[in-house]
Image (cartoon, rainbow, N blue to C red):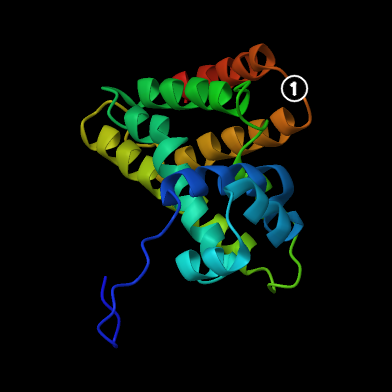
Amino acid sequence: MTGADGRRGRPRAFDVEAALERAVEVFWRHGYEGASLAQLTTAMGINRPSMYAAFGSKEELFRRAVAHYAEVDMAYAREALEQPTAYDVARAFLHANAEALTRPDRPAGCLSVQGGLAAGADDGRAAAFLAQSRLRGERALAERFARAVDEGDLSAATDPADLARFVMAVSEGHAVHAAAGVDRASLQASADIALRAIEHA
């Protein structure tokens, strides 16, 4: 990369994806407000100038970390949408979600829920950003359930948006319970109760 003066800029001395992975964990454990710049830069193995040069601000770093989390840690949600029936979609999503919330190599719970529960100096922008992110997932489910209605897989009386909201409410409730220490088997058991409701809806 060449600057305006014709000199070649110094190459970035760290792996951006690896740094984002570490930032994800800090935001996940402490939330957007609770994660300090010192914690973030220490975990990422960089100094503040490097962080600002690469990501611009703490808020932008958070947005990039959430995007990384959605791409990597929530890949199961996209895979669930490919299941052949609406019931299979819900089952794959809720069971994979329960596993993701209780992975031993990750903080308990979900970054998209825990990351922005407390609003602070950012005037709630982080919480609003995460809420919009969750709504995108809900809309994707609703679109898949609408297709199931069109295909006759779900009753014509089923409201796809209501069903998607129910599934997401279960998964988000599980995230809160997982963060409080509820184990995987218990989350799977409540997922099965929700699935019985879906099956007979």
Q: Nearer the viewer, residue 66 or 88?
A: 66
Which quadrant of the view contains residue 78? top left
From the viewer's perspective, tell me whether residue 8 is left or right of residue 41: left
Kind of residue at disc 1: Val
Look at the picture and state if 57 lies above or below 182.
below
Disc 1 marks which residue?
182
From the viewer's perspective, tell me whether residue 130 is left or right of residue 15: right
Q: Is residue 95 visible in this depiction of the protein?
A: yes
- Give the number of callouts: 1
Q: Which of 118 and 11 is in front in this view?
A: 11
Look at the picture and state if 53 lies above or below 176.
below
Look at the picture and state if 77 lies above or below 193.
below
The residue lying at 51 percent from left, 59 percent from top is: 63
User: Callout 1 environment at 10 Å: few (<14), some (14 to 19), or many (20+)?
Assistant: some
Q: What is the quadrant of the N terminus in the image?
A: bottom left
Residue found at the very far left of the displayed protein: 151
The residue lying at 32 percent from left, 44 percent from top is: 143
Residue 154 locus on image (x, y percent)? 33, 29
Residue found at the very far front of the displayed protein: 7
Q: Which of 89 and 61 is in front in this view?
A: 61
Determine the secondary structure under disc 1.
Answer: loop
Residue 99 locus on image (x, y percent)? 55, 21
Q: Nearer the viewer, residue 116 or 34?
A: 34
Residue 191 locus on image (x, y percent)? 58, 20
Q: Is residue 137 visible in this depiction of the protein?
A: no
The residue lying at 46 percent from left, 65 percent from top is: 54
Residue 15 locus on image (x, y percent)? 43, 48
From the viewer's perspective, tell me whether residue 30 is left or right of residue 153: right
